[in-house]
Image (spheres, rainbow, N blue to C red):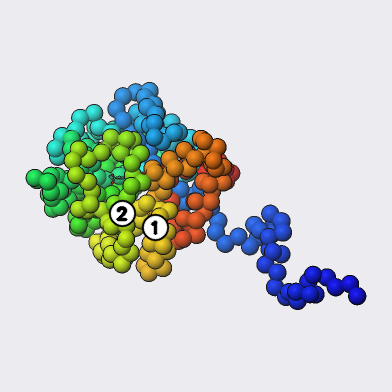
Amino acid sequence: MATTAATRLNLTRRPRRLRRTEAIRTLVRETRLTAEAFVYPLFVCEGRGVTRPISSMPGVAQLSVDETVREAEAAAADGIRAVMLFGLPSRKDAVGSQSSSPDAPVQEAIRAIKRAVPGLVVTTDVCLCEYTSHGHCGLVEGDEIVNDATVERLVETAVSHATAGADFVVPSDMMDGRVAAIRGALDARGFDHVGIIAHAVKYCSGFYGPFREAADSTPQFGDRRSHQMDPANVEEALREVEIDIAEGADIVMVKPALPYLDVVTRVKARFGHPTAAYQVSGEYSMIKAAAERGWIDEDRAVLETLTGIRRAGADLIVTYYARHAARLLA
Ligand code: PBG
Protein backbone atom coordinates (compact mmCIF):
# COMPACT_ATOMS: atom_id res chain seq x y z
CA MET A 1 0.00 0.00 0.00
CA ALA A 2 1.35 3.44 -0.99
CA THR A 3 1.32 5.75 1.98
CA THR A 4 2.17 9.42 1.59
CA ALA A 5 4.43 11.16 4.01
CA ALA A 6 1.39 13.11 5.17
CA THR A 7 -0.51 9.98 6.12
CA ARG A 8 2.47 8.63 7.93
CA LEU A 9 2.98 11.86 9.85
CA ASN A 10 -0.76 12.44 10.26
CA LEU A 11 -0.33 16.19 9.94
CA THR A 12 -3.47 18.25 10.31
CA ARG A 13 -1.47 21.43 10.69
CA ARG A 14 1.04 22.41 8.06
CA PRO A 15 2.28 25.97 8.68
CA ARG A 16 4.23 25.82 5.44
CA ARG A 17 0.97 26.17 3.47
CA LEU A 18 1.02 29.85 4.39
CA ARG A 19 4.53 30.27 3.04
CA ARG A 20 4.07 28.64 -0.36
CA THR A 21 4.04 31.76 -2.52
CA GLU A 22 4.88 35.40 -2.05
CA ALA A 23 1.20 36.23 -2.63
CA ILE A 24 0.15 33.98 0.24
CA ARG A 25 2.92 35.26 2.49
CA THR A 26 1.74 38.79 1.80
CA LEU A 27 -1.86 37.91 2.68
CA VAL A 28 -0.96 36.70 6.14
CA ARG A 29 1.84 39.17 6.87
CA GLU A 30 1.44 40.62 10.36
CA THR A 31 3.77 43.59 10.20
CA ARG A 32 3.60 46.03 7.33
CA LEU A 33 6.59 48.24 6.84
CA THR A 34 5.75 51.49 5.09
CA ALA A 35 7.71 54.64 4.42
CA GLU A 36 5.05 56.55 6.35
CA ALA A 37 6.55 55.25 9.58
CA PHE A 38 10.00 56.69 8.87
CA VAL A 39 11.57 59.84 10.23
CA TYR A 40 14.65 60.93 8.30
CA PRO A 41 17.49 62.63 10.22
CA LEU A 42 19.44 65.44 8.52
CA PHE A 43 22.59 67.26 9.66
CA VAL A 44 22.42 70.95 8.79
CA CYS A 45 25.57 73.06 8.55
CA GLU A 46 26.48 76.60 7.54
CA GLY A 47 27.21 77.77 4.02
CA ARG A 48 25.71 77.25 0.59
CA GLY A 49 26.06 74.30 -1.74
CA VAL A 50 27.87 72.32 0.96
CA THR A 51 27.73 68.51 1.06
CA ARG A 52 30.29 67.23 3.55
CA PRO A 53 30.26 63.42 3.68
CA ILE A 54 30.51 61.75 7.09
CA SER A 55 33.22 59.11 6.76
CA SER A 56 31.83 56.75 9.39
CA MET A 57 28.33 56.91 7.89
CA PRO A 58 28.68 56.26 4.14
CA GLY A 59 25.76 57.86 2.29
CA VAL A 60 25.12 60.46 5.01
CA ALA A 61 26.46 64.01 4.83
CA GLN A 62 26.35 67.33 6.60
CA LEU A 63 24.34 69.64 4.34
CA SER A 64 24.01 73.39 4.12
CA VAL A 65 20.47 74.77 4.33
CA ASP A 66 19.92 74.82 0.54
CA GLU A 67 21.14 71.23 0.20
CA THR A 68 19.04 70.22 3.21
CA VAL A 69 15.96 71.55 1.44
CA ARG A 70 16.83 69.56 -1.69
CA GLU A 71 17.29 66.42 0.36
CA ALA A 72 14.01 67.03 2.19
CA GLU A 73 12.22 67.45 -1.14
CA ALA A 74 13.74 64.23 -2.46
CA ALA A 75 12.74 62.40 0.72
CA ALA A 76 9.18 63.67 0.43
CA ALA A 77 9.12 62.44 -3.18
CA ASP A 78 10.17 59.01 -1.87
CA GLY A 79 7.17 58.99 0.47
CA ILE A 80 8.86 60.13 3.68
CA ARG A 81 6.56 62.16 5.93
CA ALA A 82 8.96 63.56 8.49
CA VAL A 83 12.52 64.78 8.92
CA MET A 84 14.54 65.34 12.09
CA LEU A 85 17.04 68.18 12.00
CA PHE A 86 20.38 68.30 13.82
CA GLY A 87 22.45 71.47 13.74
CA LEU A 88 26.14 72.11 13.17
CA PRO A 89 26.86 75.64 14.37
CA SER A 90 29.84 77.63 13.10
CA ARG A 91 30.65 78.74 16.63
CA LYS A 92 30.57 76.76 19.87
CA ASP A 93 30.78 78.02 23.44
CA ALA A 94 30.35 76.75 26.99
CA VAL A 95 26.58 77.36 27.07
CA GLY A 96 25.83 76.39 23.47
CA SER A 97 24.47 79.86 22.59
CA GLN A 98 23.90 78.99 18.95
CA SER A 99 21.29 76.35 19.77
CA SER A 100 18.66 79.02 20.32
CA SER A 101 19.82 81.56 17.74
CA PRO A 102 17.14 82.47 15.19
CA ASP A 103 19.77 82.50 12.42
CA ALA A 104 21.48 79.19 13.21
CA PRO A 105 21.38 76.45 10.55
CA VAL A 106 18.51 74.47 12.08
CA GLN A 107 16.24 77.49 12.51
CA GLU A 108 16.96 78.57 8.93
CA ALA A 109 16.40 75.06 7.63
CA ILE A 110 13.03 74.80 9.41
CA ARG A 111 11.82 77.97 7.66
CA ALA A 112 13.24 76.93 4.29
CA ILE A 113 11.77 73.41 4.40
CA LYS A 114 8.38 74.76 5.48
CA ARG A 115 8.43 77.09 2.45
CA ALA A 116 9.56 74.41 -0.01
CA VAL A 117 7.66 71.34 1.28
CA PRO A 118 4.89 72.63 3.55
CA GLY A 119 3.38 69.18 4.10
CA LEU A 120 6.56 67.61 5.42
CA VAL A 121 6.58 67.19 9.21
CA VAL A 122 9.62 68.99 10.60
CA THR A 123 11.00 67.73 13.89
CA THR A 124 14.11 69.13 15.54
CA ASP A 125 16.65 67.66 17.91
CA VAL A 126 16.87 69.67 21.12
CA CYS A 127 20.16 69.16 22.90
CA LEU A 128 23.25 71.22 23.59
CA CYS A 129 25.99 68.71 22.73
CA GLU A 130 26.35 69.89 19.13
CA TYR A 131 26.63 73.49 20.35
CA THR A 132 28.87 73.35 23.40
CA SER A 133 32.64 73.69 23.15
CA HIS A 134 33.03 70.80 25.62
CA GLY A 135 30.62 68.55 23.71
CA HIS A 136 28.37 67.87 26.70
CA CYS A 137 24.57 67.82 26.52
CA GLY A 138 24.27 70.51 29.17
CA LEU A 139 25.96 73.23 31.14
CA VAL A 140 28.98 72.05 33.07
CA GLU A 141 30.09 73.05 36.57
CA GLY A 142 33.31 71.37 37.62
CA ASP A 143 32.87 67.93 36.14
CA GLU A 144 29.11 67.86 36.64
CA ILE A 145 26.39 68.45 34.06
CA VAL A 146 23.94 70.62 35.94
CA ASN A 147 20.30 69.76 35.40
CA ASP A 148 18.09 72.75 36.05
CA ALA A 149 20.20 75.42 34.37
CA THR A 150 20.52 73.13 31.35
CA VAL A 151 16.75 72.79 31.17
CA GLU A 152 16.47 76.58 30.82
CA ARG A 153 18.76 76.48 27.76
CA LEU A 154 16.79 73.55 26.31
CA VAL A 155 13.57 75.50 26.75
CA GLU A 156 15.06 78.49 24.88
CA THR A 157 16.18 76.16 22.12
CA ALA A 158 12.80 74.46 21.80
CA VAL A 159 11.01 77.81 21.71
CA SER A 160 13.32 79.07 18.96
CA HIS A 161 12.58 75.95 16.89
CA ALA A 162 8.84 76.41 17.40
CA THR A 163 9.16 80.07 16.45
CA ALA A 164 10.88 79.03 13.21
CA GLY A 165 7.98 76.68 12.46
CA ALA A 166 8.92 73.22 13.77
CA ASP A 167 6.04 70.77 14.16
CA PHE A 168 7.73 68.75 16.91
CA VAL A 169 10.68 69.37 19.15
CA VAL A 170 12.70 66.32 20.14
CA PRO A 171 14.60 66.68 23.41
CA SER A 172 17.44 64.12 23.37
CA ASP A 173 19.36 65.38 26.38
CA MET A 174 17.92 63.20 29.20
CA MET A 175 17.82 66.02 31.77
CA ASP A 176 15.08 65.66 34.39
CA GLY A 177 11.98 67.81 34.03
CA ARG A 178 12.69 69.15 30.56
CA VAL A 179 9.50 67.88 28.94
CA ALA A 180 7.27 69.72 31.40
CA ALA A 181 9.40 72.85 31.17
CA ILE A 182 9.34 72.83 27.36
CA ARG A 183 5.59 72.11 27.30
CA GLY A 184 4.91 75.00 29.64
CA ALA A 185 7.06 77.43 27.67
CA LEU A 186 5.56 76.44 24.32
CA ASP A 187 2.02 76.81 25.65
CA ALA A 188 2.78 80.17 27.23
CA ARG A 189 3.92 81.48 23.85
CA GLY A 190 0.99 80.23 21.80
CA PHE A 191 2.72 77.11 20.49
CA ASP A 192 0.21 74.69 21.95
CA HIS A 193 0.04 72.96 18.55
CA VAL A 194 3.75 72.13 18.58
CA GLY A 195 4.34 68.60 19.85
CA ILE A 196 7.08 66.92 21.85
CA ILE A 197 8.78 63.68 20.88
CA ALA A 198 10.67 62.83 24.04
CA HIS A 199 13.77 60.69 24.14
CA ALA A 200 12.17 59.11 27.17
CA VAL A 201 14.49 56.13 27.12
CA LYS A 202 17.97 56.89 25.91
CA TYR A 203 20.66 54.42 26.81
CA CYS A 204 24.32 55.20 27.33
CA SER A 205 25.26 53.38 24.16
CA GLY A 206 28.37 52.50 22.20
CA PHE A 207 26.28 52.78 19.05
CA TYR A 208 26.33 56.60 18.99
CA GLY A 209 29.98 56.70 17.86
CA PRO A 210 29.46 57.68 14.19
CA PHE A 211 26.86 60.30 15.16
CA ARG A 212 29.45 62.10 17.22
CA GLU A 213 31.55 62.49 14.08
CA ALA A 214 28.42 63.55 12.17
CA ALA A 215 27.39 66.11 14.78
CA ASP A 216 30.89 66.95 15.99
CA SER A 217 29.68 66.34 19.54
CA THR A 218 32.23 64.06 21.16
CA PRO A 219 32.59 65.04 24.84
CA GLN A 220 36.00 66.62 25.42
CA PHE A 221 36.19 64.94 28.85
CA GLY A 222 34.15 62.33 30.67
CA ASP A 223 31.11 60.61 29.17
CA ARG A 224 27.30 60.70 29.27
CA ARG A 225 26.77 58.23 32.10
CA SER A 226 25.39 60.82 34.50
CA HIS A 227 22.25 61.27 32.41
CA GLN A 228 21.92 58.44 29.86
CA MET A 229 20.52 55.11 31.01
CA ASP A 230 22.27 51.92 31.99
CA PRO A 231 21.78 49.33 29.21
CA ALA A 232 20.93 46.75 31.87
CA ASN A 233 17.73 48.47 33.00
CA VAL A 234 14.17 48.13 31.74
CA GLU A 235 12.05 48.91 34.83
CA GLU A 236 13.82 52.26 34.88
CA ALA A 237 12.86 52.75 31.23
CA LEU A 238 9.19 52.31 32.12
CA ARG A 239 9.52 54.88 34.91
CA GLU A 240 11.16 57.32 32.48
CA VAL A 241 8.32 56.88 30.00
CA GLU A 242 5.70 57.31 32.71
CA ILE A 243 7.30 60.59 33.77
CA ASP A 244 7.62 61.94 30.22
CA ILE A 245 4.01 61.12 29.36
CA ALA A 246 2.87 62.78 32.59
CA GLU A 247 4.96 65.83 31.67
CA GLY A 248 3.30 66.09 28.28
CA ALA A 249 5.23 64.00 25.75
CA ASP A 250 3.09 63.36 22.66
CA ILE A 251 5.38 60.61 21.40
CA VAL A 252 7.90 58.66 23.44
CA MET A 253 11.11 57.32 21.99
CA VAL A 254 13.44 54.45 22.76
CA LYS A 255 17.05 54.71 21.58
CA PRO A 256 18.97 52.82 20.25
CA ALA A 257 16.56 50.36 18.65
CA LEU A 258 18.06 46.96 17.89
CA PRO A 259 19.67 46.13 21.26
CA TYR A 260 16.51 47.38 23.05
CA LEU A 261 13.59 45.78 21.20
CA ASP A 262 12.29 44.29 24.45
CA VAL A 263 12.13 47.81 25.84
CA VAL A 264 10.13 48.99 22.81
CA THR A 265 7.71 46.11 23.30
CA ARG A 266 7.21 46.79 26.99
CA VAL A 267 6.82 50.53 26.55
CA LYS A 268 4.19 50.07 23.84
CA ALA A 269 2.33 47.36 25.77
CA ARG A 270 2.32 49.24 29.07
CA PHE A 271 1.40 52.72 27.89
CA GLY A 272 -0.24 52.32 24.47
CA HIS A 273 1.27 55.70 23.63
CA PRO A 274 2.65 56.62 20.20
CA THR A 275 6.10 55.06 20.38
CA ALA A 276 9.18 55.76 18.29
CA ALA A 277 12.44 53.87 18.08
CA TYR A 278 15.70 55.36 16.83
CA GLN A 279 17.89 53.15 14.68
CA VAL A 280 21.03 55.06 15.58
CA SER A 281 24.22 55.83 13.69
CA GLY A 282 26.10 52.74 14.87
CA GLU A 283 23.25 50.49 13.79
CA TYR A 284 23.36 52.12 10.37
CA SER A 285 27.13 51.99 10.02
CA MET A 286 27.27 48.38 11.16
CA ILE A 287 25.06 47.32 8.27
CA LYS A 288 26.92 49.61 5.84
CA ALA A 289 30.33 48.29 6.82
CA ALA A 290 29.35 44.64 6.54
CA ALA A 291 27.62 45.29 3.22
CA GLU A 292 30.65 47.15 1.83
CA ARG A 293 32.74 44.06 2.56
CA GLY A 294 30.15 41.91 0.83
CA TRP A 295 29.45 40.06 4.06
CA ILE A 296 25.73 40.73 4.17
CA ASP A 297 23.05 41.78 1.73
CA GLU A 298 22.36 45.41 2.66
CA ASP A 299 18.81 45.64 1.32
CA ARG A 300 17.69 42.51 3.13
CA ALA A 301 19.38 43.55 6.37
CA VAL A 302 17.78 47.00 6.19
CA LEU A 303 14.25 45.70 5.68
CA GLU A 304 14.72 42.94 8.24
CA THR A 305 15.93 45.26 10.98
CA LEU A 306 13.26 47.87 10.28
CA THR A 307 10.56 45.19 10.21
CA GLY A 308 11.87 43.87 13.52
CA ILE A 309 11.65 47.31 15.08
CA ARG A 310 8.06 47.72 13.87
CA ARG A 311 7.15 44.19 15.00
CA ALA A 312 8.52 44.98 18.46
CA GLY A 313 5.91 47.72 18.71
CA ALA A 314 7.36 50.92 17.31
CA ASP A 315 4.91 53.13 15.44
CA LEU A 316 7.64 55.40 14.10
CA ILE A 317 11.25 54.65 13.23
CA VAL A 318 13.93 57.29 13.05
CA THR A 319 16.44 55.94 10.55
CA TYR A 320 19.24 57.11 8.29
CA TYR A 321 18.00 54.38 5.95
CA ALA A 322 14.63 56.11 5.51
CA ARG A 323 15.07 57.02 1.84
CA HIS A 324 16.85 53.80 0.97
CA ALA A 325 14.13 51.70 2.60
CA ALA A 326 11.33 53.80 1.13
CA ARG A 327 12.70 53.15 -2.34
CA LEU A 328 12.98 49.42 -1.62
CA LEU A 329 9.37 49.36 -0.46
CA ALA A 330 8.03 51.38 -3.41
C1 PBG B 1 22.56 63.78 21.69
C2 PBG B 1 22.23 62.83 20.63
C3 PBG B 1 22.92 61.65 20.33
C4 PBG B 1 22.26 61.08 19.25
C5 PBG B 1 21.20 61.88 18.93
N1 PBG B 1 21.17 62.95 19.81
C6 PBG B 1 24.12 61.01 20.80
C7 PBG B 1 24.75 61.21 22.06
O1 PBG B 1 24.13 61.06 23.11
O2 PBG B 1 25.95 61.50 22.00
C8 PBG B 1 22.70 59.82 18.61
C9 PBG B 1 22.03 59.46 17.37
C10 PBG B 1 22.77 58.47 16.57
O3 PBG B 1 23.74 57.84 17.03
O4 PBG B 1 22.36 58.28 15.44
N2 PBG B 1 22.03 65.00 21.45
Q: Which tag, 1 or 2, sits closer to the chain's start?
A: 2
Relative height, residue 216 to residue 251 (above, below): above
Q: Which type of secondary structure does the marked residue at label 1 adopt? A: helix
Determine the image quadrant of residue 131.
top left
Q: Residue furthest front?
A: 1
Residue 204 location in percent, x, y?
29, 51
Is 325 on the left-hand or right-hand side of 20? left
Where is mark 1, residue-wise? 260
Q: Give the residue drawn at x 39%, y 66%.
A: 266
Whereabouts is ligand 1, in terms of quadrant? top left
Residue 73 position in % (x across, y down) = 45, 35
Q: Is residue 194 above or below residue 97?
A: below
Residue sitting at x 19%, y 33%: 92
Percent position of residue 58, x then y:
44, 33
Q: Amino acid at mark 2?
A: Tyr
Residue at 89% over, 72% down: 2
Q: Nearer the viewer, residue 24 or 262?
A: 262
Q: Is residue 94 above or below residue 237?
A: above
Residue highlighted by disc 2: 203
Say which residue appears at 43% left-offset and 31% top-offset.
70
Q: In the rendering, at what x and y percent does residue 259 appear?
A: 40, 55
Image-quadrant location for residue 103: top left
Q: Is disc 2 placed on a helix, strand or loop?
A: loop
Q: Residues within 10 Å of mark 2 (few under 14, many from 20)?
A: many
Q: Is residue 143 visible?
A: yes
Amino acid of disc 1: Tyr
Which residue is most to the left? 142
Q: Residue furthest right?
A: 1
Q: Assess mark 2: CB under 8 A from ligand 1?
A: no
